[in-house]
Image (cartoon, coloured by chain):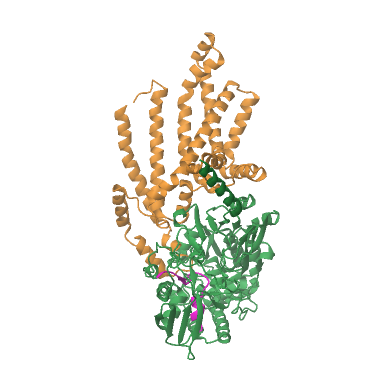
Amino acid sequence: MRFKQLALAAALGAAAFAGPVRAETVVKAVMHSDVKIIDPIWTTAYISRNVGYMIYDTLYALDAKGDVQPEMVDTTDISADKLTYTIKLRDGLLWHDGTPVTADDCIASIKRWSAKDTLGQKVFSTFVDNMSTPDAKTIVIKLKEPTGLLLFALGKPSSNVPFMMPKRVAETDPNKQISDYTGSGPFVLKQDEWKPGDKIVFTKFAKYKPRTEPASGLAGGKVVNVDRVEWLAISDAQQAMNALAAGEIDYFEQPPHDLLPLVKGDANLKLVTGATGQFTMRINSTQPPFTNPKIKQALWYALNQEDFLKAAVGNAEYYKTCKSFYPCGTPMATDVGMAGLLEGNAKKSQELLKEAGYDGTPVVLMASTDLPILTNLSPVAKQLLERGGFKVDMQSMDWQTLVARRAKKDAPNAGGWNIFNTAWVTADILNPAMVGFMNASCEKALPGWPCDPALEKIREAFLRAPDLATQKQLAADAQKEAIAYTTHIPLGEYDQPIAVRKNINNTMVAPVPVFWNLTKK
Amino acid sequence: MFGYVLRRLVSTIPVMLIVAVFVFLMLRVGPHDPAAIIAGDNANADQIAQIRQQLGLDKPLLTQLFVWLSAILHGDFGESFFFKKKVVSLIADRIEPTLALAICTSILAVVIAVPLGVVAAMRRGSMVDRLVMGFSVLGFSVPVFVIGYVLIYIFAIKFPILPVQGYSRIADGFEPFIRSIILPSLTLAVVYVALIARMTRTSVLEVLGEDYIRTAYARGLTPLQVLVRHALPNAAVPIVTVIGLGVALLIGGVVVTESVFAIPGIGRLTVDAVLARDFPTIQAIILLFSFIYVMINLIIDVSYTLLDPRIRY
């Protein structure tokens, strides 16, 4: 009995000296969508990409300036003839199951990614001769001819991102979804707690070895300062804002712009920098009246960016006009070819339509009504186009119907379409090889199917450009040609701030919402 | 009676078959392409076609229908296009919150509405009657989501005593469960309180004018005795009909309420599945809802025999 009392006293004493147990730091977030698919190679959905950044790592990544930086890589040696890349992995890289990351894993991952991703396909099928692994930590990539885009492609920031996966996972057919979510990223997916439609949970990967450089953009040290991150599925924006105000969540990725005053009016909340986007009008080049180049040119004069931005975003603090196909402020941005365009010159538009012999064929404008950021674009487009002399048939539908219908090549009056408005995350449109709507390879292009061999030739040359100066020149040439052909029309840029509780700090300024570096007091 | 129930049960088979074929065709005939949604915005035509092939959506319509119906006969409702889970297990995961919401709402609605309707009938033309009827009109007219937002503003934001959103499972504790279910149940109950209170008032008023009620009063019974022994049992058939239909109509209400309160139930699953054009999930949910509807109707019909001895099948 006495012994038991002594043992209890000793235990209590030890507990007192050990101090208080540290509470688990949990960040609860509402992202732009519920997570239904994890495999970020199988789908290009942004939410799957965002999960990818939680649980996987990349060989390279873009920093805040848009420069390619090593991430899982220690050293990169490029031969003098620029045909051999010798890439050494960092020490201490582990998969979540505790096994080391090897070069074989990375090659299998690159192969799966490059079979799916448009840029990956282009770079790896055109330039890469072979890949080998002289030892467990070295990848050697031999090229058939030089390209300045190999490392950029491996550090591509948005869908599809070349995430590294264990070889056993990466060997899955690229057209089949993976079911083993072992990564080597800073967070581990708690698969037993993932309930689609409810929440997805990530915990800190204790054995993750961050780089020593400070985090910058998507590059640098991915230091995790929280124990657990939960993404809750709240589909109603007002409710997500209510939950943020009540302290039930800490982070709201995409609050609609009209709810931002609520954040500013609440002392417990604040806005931090999030992703930026570009509004875009896509034109179907296969259907009249836009089979006539002059009629397409009239669009450039009829539209103006300011009207779209005012209607869609409202507050000038969160938008800017940008007459460039590439995001303003990034290396390829240029206003070449844009003089006099996108200024709402209705008279010039009407003149061009008259010269082109426009017969009043109605332009079928597909208007999506369920995504708040896009909803107001189409009524503005209708008004501006009608002012410019077009006859417009605006047809409202939800975004998923629009996605299905835009793939139809039928005549607009038989279930097809002429134009629709959408938005790109700027990380997806950094150069002519990445801008999906600049792909002018006819049948193989994205819906709208522009067919312009001259533009394709410039995009091919861009892949071979040896340096930044040449890349910039070719990006400008591509823009000029895309304007002349009218693949699509940029309608201005917007910022999408993230709303957080005041005790959330050090969020990363990056094109993708990431949860490393972030702290919660 | 047994024969009647058996006949009704057998008749559900063709009803369910018609519903199944109708839903299947409606989903396929419309301009929907789950493959394009799954593939994402940056996907090219080849990627979309590959996914379409994997999902079996490239096969002829009749083949798809035959494959689906035969699978159902084997108890297999298919796999969700998006969740990569069997639809049955997906629904099983979501049934608890919806069931909890439906039961709590029904209890709340009946407990509040029947006394309100009775009081309004007993005091016909009084201020109480007018208040009840005024509330009834309001309950019908205000959309569920507006009621939800107002209740949230009052009880979760202005006076933070209840959570704004979410659902806590019963297994995680009764107190958090009750706290999480109060606001959604109240929100959803308002319209049913309005409906049931109105029907109770009308039904009780009708009975109160009958000769046997006058006789009961003449025998010296108190108003409460008249109400409990004579009025309510005779007014019960239409009230039970409305309660039963109300439970069936709850199906529509839970879709909105679960979306507003971020409750991971069948209603949310329905919205998610429809938005994502997740055909197997939509088909299974509609079959489930139809089955529930048919069963509730059967239960109501059978309950008539208990409430009114004159009704026999």
The answer to which of A507 and A184 lies nearer the viewer is A184
User: Can residue A458 be seen here?
Assistant: no
The answer to which of A19 and A128 lies nearer the viewer is A19
Determine whether, in the image, residue A385 is placed left or right of residue A408: right
Q: Quadrant of residue A501?
A: bottom right
User: Can residue B142 be seen here?
Assistant: yes
Determine whether, in the image, residue A1 is placed left or right of residue A278: left
| Part of the protein shown in magenta | A148-166
Q: Does the segment drawn in magenta span residue A363?
A: no
Tint applied to chain A in the drawing:
green
In the image, residue A139 above or below residue A395: below
In the image, residue A233 above or below residue A178: above
Which residue does the image show at 54% across and 45% down from the upper left? A6
Horizontal and vertical percent for residue B136?
58, 33
Q: Main secondary structure of the magenta part?
A: loop
Q: Quadrant of residue A431?
A: bottom right
The answer to which of A444 and A17 lies nearer the viewer is A17
**Count of numbered tags:** 0
In the image, residue B58 above or below residue B187: below
The answer to which of A265 and B208 lies nearer the viewer is A265
Q: Does the segment drawn in magenta span residue A158?
A: yes
In what quadrant of the picture does the C terminus of chain A appear? bottom right
Horizontal and vertical percent for residue A289?
51, 71
Residue farthest toward the front in the current orientation of the protein:
A2
Residue farthest toward the top in the current orientation of the protein:
B219
Tint applied to chain B in the drawing:
orange
